[in-house]
Image (cartoon, rainbow, N blue to C red):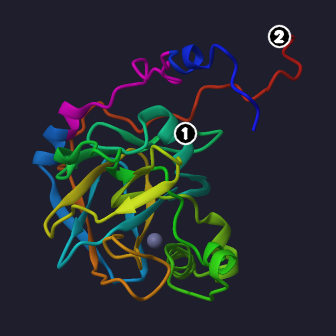
Amino acid sequence: MTSAPSDADRRRAVEPVICYPNDTLPAPEMALYAAARATARKQSETWVPPRDARCFRVPAGHFFRITSVEGPQVGDLNLWNADDLSERFYSGKTRALHGTHITKGERMWSGFPYLRPMATVVADTLGWYGIDDYGGSVHDVIGTRCDPYTGNLLAGTQYHHCCHSNLTRALAQELGVSPAEAEPFVHDVLNVFMCTGFTRDTGQYFMKASPVRPGDYLEFFAEIDLLGGLSACPGGDCSAEHSSDVAACHPLLVEVFAPEPGALEGWLPPARNGYDRSHGVGSGD
Ligand SMILES: [Zn+2]
């Protein structure tokens, strides 16, 4: 242990600054989305069985809603550009831009070199939860996804229904490819309905029983043509353990809603990020 300097307390007392002030982020057109949503009709639905995953497609300008049914259940969500799977959700940058958990008015951003909104949260019936006394909140972008490799590392197990494997199977089936070909496209998730945080004393990732009740939902506006994957986590409400068949698990429902033609007059999907990608080569600066 190195000894603390004499001014240690003063250094700890320095006030933090926000890394990415987001007041210059392009604001989602929430009023336009709400007006379009008021005209929307349900187009399709996908049921995600417990401890399994399904894929679904959402055209740009449509809405998709993830609903808790039957009992408390956490969902692990992956998003891809439906026309180019190399563009996928980037949980790390979404976290840097919006914070550890996302809610209405915040967005799921894609990775480099695209870095554009893929989906915008337009409704969150758990928005009332806020941040609890443990620092926990709902719908996090801090966890990764439960996976069989970490289970094997920590406990030597071979468990096949972690969200990572569920998403791999679902994507393989959707694309008509092998699990080995699909697996590299599976990425860190948005933990829908999951209640998580970091312990203040040790900084460790924690989970606690999700406050989600049947009927609660999280709804998104698709900014680009999307392929989604949703896993009903083997952790159930994530109150105790995951990566096993111990927890009570329930299905999740995904519904897609199409607004009336013309309801999004003047709206266009966001363009790819404007950085020129020369990375300082040949530009002289
Ligand atoms: Zn999981």
The image quarter in which residue 214 lies: bottom left
Local crowd size for mark 2, using a 10 Å CA cut-off: few (<14), some (14–19), many (≥20):
few
On-image quarter of the N terminus: top right
User: Residue 35 colored magenta?
Assistant: no
Cα distance in 3D space between marks 2 and 1? 26 Å
User: Residue 28 colored magenta?
Assistant: yes
* Identity of the residue drawn at 51% across and 78% down: 162
Asked if residue 208 can be seen in this view, the reply is yes
User: In the depicted view, which residue is nearer to us: 79 or 100?
Assistant: 100
* Identity of the residue drawn at 35% across and 53% down: 139
Q: Which residues are magenta?
A: 15-33
- Helix, strand or loop for disc 2: loop
User: In the depicted view, which residue is nearer to us: 158 or 70?
Assistant: 158
- Judging by the rendered image, the residue that carries numbered circle 2 is 285
Residue 182 appears at what percent x and percent y?
Answer: 63, 73
* Identity of the residue drawn at 62% across and 87% down: 157
- Helix, strand or loop for disc 1: helix
Question: Which amino acid, by three-letter code, is at mark 2?
Answer: Asp
Residue 233 appears at what percent x and percent y?
Answer: 41, 74
